Amino acid sequence: MFKGTGVDIPNRSADQVRSIFEELDQDRNGNLSRQEFIALWDALAKERCAADPKVVALGLCAFLDTNGDRKLQISELKKFLPLFGLKGMALAAIPLPDWASVDYRGLLR
Ligand SMILES: [Ca+2]
Ligand SMILES: [Ca+2]
């Protein structure tokens, strides 16, 4: 279980992880370039989402849940809304009460 997320993670040995990195290090220079890193991210995301489609949502919610109460308060949720193009005044214009929260663990169960 990935701490605080409720997401199960695979238990890989150091040799398995080394093998994954070596496979992704296409030019064998010992570093992952941006393109190689994106390929790593893509492979992991596909694997994890195949195992549990909620994994990305749980991970994102756990990341946003800075006070760790397993709910997203409006102040925490507002950090996410700019990804949808809502910024500054547009974000402030939305009548979201400060007392409201979303129990994401309950929604994603
Ligand atoms: Ca490389
Ligand atoms: Ca919270």
Image (spheres, helix red, strand yellow):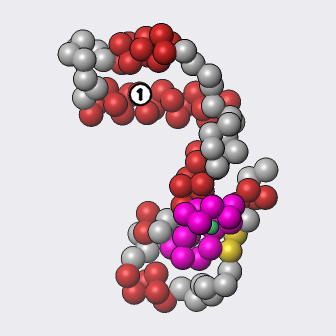
Neighbours of disc 1 within 10 Å: few (<14), some (14-19), many (20+):
some
> Number of labelled discs?
1
Label 1 amino acid?
Leu
Image position, residue 51 (x, y; %): 68, 30
> Considering only vertical position in the picture, is 68 above or below 29?
below
> Considering only vertical position in the picture, is 24 above or below 61?
above
Residue 101 found in image quarter = bottom right
Q: Is residue 41 visible to the viewer in this orientation of the structure?
A: yes
Image position, residue 19 (x, y; %): 43, 11
> Measuring 48% from the left and 10% from the top, which residue is drawn there?
15
Q: Is residue 84 visible to the viewer in this orientation of the structure?
A: no
**Residue placed most toward the observer, 39 or 22:** 22
Residue 102 found in image quarter = bottom right
Mark 1 vs ligand 1: CB below 8 Å = no
At mark 1, the secondary structure is: helix
Please state the quadrant of the image where ligand 2 appears: bottom right
Q: Start and end of the magenta stretch?
A: 65-78
Q: Is residue 91 magenta?
A: no
**Residue placed most toward the observer, 3 or 78:** 3
- The residue indicated by pointer 1 is 40
Residue 100 found in image quarter = bottom right
> Measuring 54% from the left and 70% from the top, which residue is drawn there?
76
